[in-house]
Image (cartoon, rainbow, N blue to C red):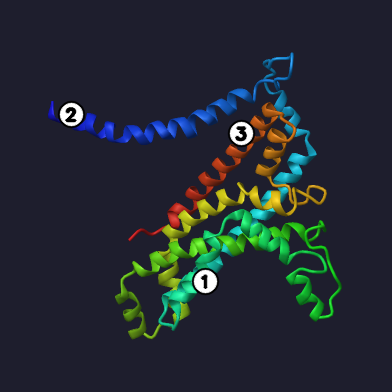
């Protein structure tokens, strides 16, 4: 009876979190899957079972494939650079340097700014002829360029904004991991005459792998859920050059009110994220050393 009461007490403690998880995660996912097999309800025409028709439409949708390709390039551009910059900043501010508190604040400040505010700040930077970037390129004698209005540079501009905002956030996790490492490791390496780069490559970086795995999962999710910056800066243009997958779902669902097709697109996004998360744990978990 005592063991039963312990189990009941444990499940009661988990119940509030389990209810919230079911209501706001599992139920919406199941409802989205269910609605993806129906047609879109219109006035006088209730939704009807259409099976895989929405998914067939998705396979033939060029904007979907364009958005998916944009998202993959966006992820490849933001994830490695954000993580590398975060590690570099964490190692720097973890050392014995003057003003490291101010540096930490400066690196972390973009993280606490609202995404809409960040988008408007960088929108000013990229403004043709008057923006800060245009002023700098003008001093170098370079011609004026519409950075957000060109297919060649619009996505790269969003990548720069995302790296600027996310690197400081990831830095906090790496800084906490660096400060939790035993100092005698560095002392032993110094006695052995190991260089700082060798110590980082052979000791520090392997010990940072649990943090890297955590950060990588979050970075992948962030790269597939960007909407705010696109709404403010480009609205998916020019010619869908900056339309990412979640923004396209937002467009289909809330601009064209095709909720059934948006549900199918959402399921595709969930499958992609699930496969990426599974791949990360499958390949990185074996290389991760936990202290």
- Going from N to C along the chain, the mark reached first, 1 or 2, is 2
Q: Residue at x 65, y 22 (%)?
A: 37
Quadrant where the C terminus sits is: bottom left
- Which residue has dot 3 on it? 267
Badge 2 density bin: few <14, some 14–19, many ≥20, Cα 10 Å: few
Q: Is residue 88 above or below residue 285?
A: below
Q: CA distance from mark 1 to mark 3?
A: 39 Å
- Which residue has dot 2 on it? 5
Q: Residue furthest left?
A: 2
63 sits to left or right of 158 = right
15 and 212: which is toward the camera: 15
Displayed quadrant of residue 208:
bottom left
Badge 1 density bin: few <14, some 14–19, many ≥20, Cα 10 Å: few
- Going from N to C along the chain, the mark reached first, 1 or 3, is 1
Instruction: Indicate the position of residue 149 as horizontal and vertical percent values.
Output: 82, 57
Q: CA distance from mark 2 to mark 3?
A: 40 Å
Q: Is residue 16 above or below residue 53?
A: below
Q: Secondary structure at mark 2?
A: helix
Q: Is residue 145 above or below residue 246?
A: below
Q: Are marks 1 and 3 in contact (CB under 8 Å)?
A: no
Instruction: Indicate the position of residue 278 as horizontal and vertical percent values.
Output: 51, 44
Q: Is residue 30 above or below residue 125?
A: above
- Mark 1 or 3: in front is 1
């Amino acid at each position: 009876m005592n063991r039963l009461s312990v189990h009941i007490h444990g499940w009661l403690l988990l119940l509030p979190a389990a209810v919230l998880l079911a209501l706001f995660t599992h139920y919406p996912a199941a409802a989205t899957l269910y609605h993806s097999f129906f047609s879109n309800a219109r006035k006088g025409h209730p939704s009807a079972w259409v099976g895989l028709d929405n998914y067939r439409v998705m396979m033939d949708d060029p904007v979907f494939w364009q958005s998916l390709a944009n998202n993959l390039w966006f992820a490849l551009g933001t994830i490695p650079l954000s993580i590398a910059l975060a590690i570099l900043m964490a190692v720097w501010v973890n050392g014995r340097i003057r003003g490291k508190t101010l540096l930490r604040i400066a690196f972390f400040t973009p993280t606490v700014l609202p995404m809409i505010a960040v988008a408007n700040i960088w929108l000013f930077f990229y403004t043709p002829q008057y923006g800060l970037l245009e002023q700098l390129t003008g001093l170098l004698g370079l011609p004026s360029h519409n950075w957000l209005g060109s297919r060649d540079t619009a996505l790269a501009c969003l990548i720069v904004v995302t790296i600027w905002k996310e690197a400081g956030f990831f830095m906090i996790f790496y800084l906490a991991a660096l400060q939790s490492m035993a100092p005698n490791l560095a002392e032993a390496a110094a006695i052995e005459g190991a260089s700082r780069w060798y110590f980082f490559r052979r000791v520090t970086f392997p010990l940072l792998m649990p943090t890297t795995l955590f950060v990588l999962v979050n970075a992948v999710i962030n790269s597939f859920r960007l909407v705010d910056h696109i709404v403010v800066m480009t609205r998916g243009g020019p010619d869908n050059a900056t339309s990412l997958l979640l923004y396209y779902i937002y467009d289909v669902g809330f601009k064209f009110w095709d909720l059934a097709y948006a549900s199918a697109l959402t399921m595709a996004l969930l499958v992609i994220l699930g496969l990426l998360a599974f791949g990360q744990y499958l390949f990185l978990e074996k290389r991760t050393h936990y202290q």
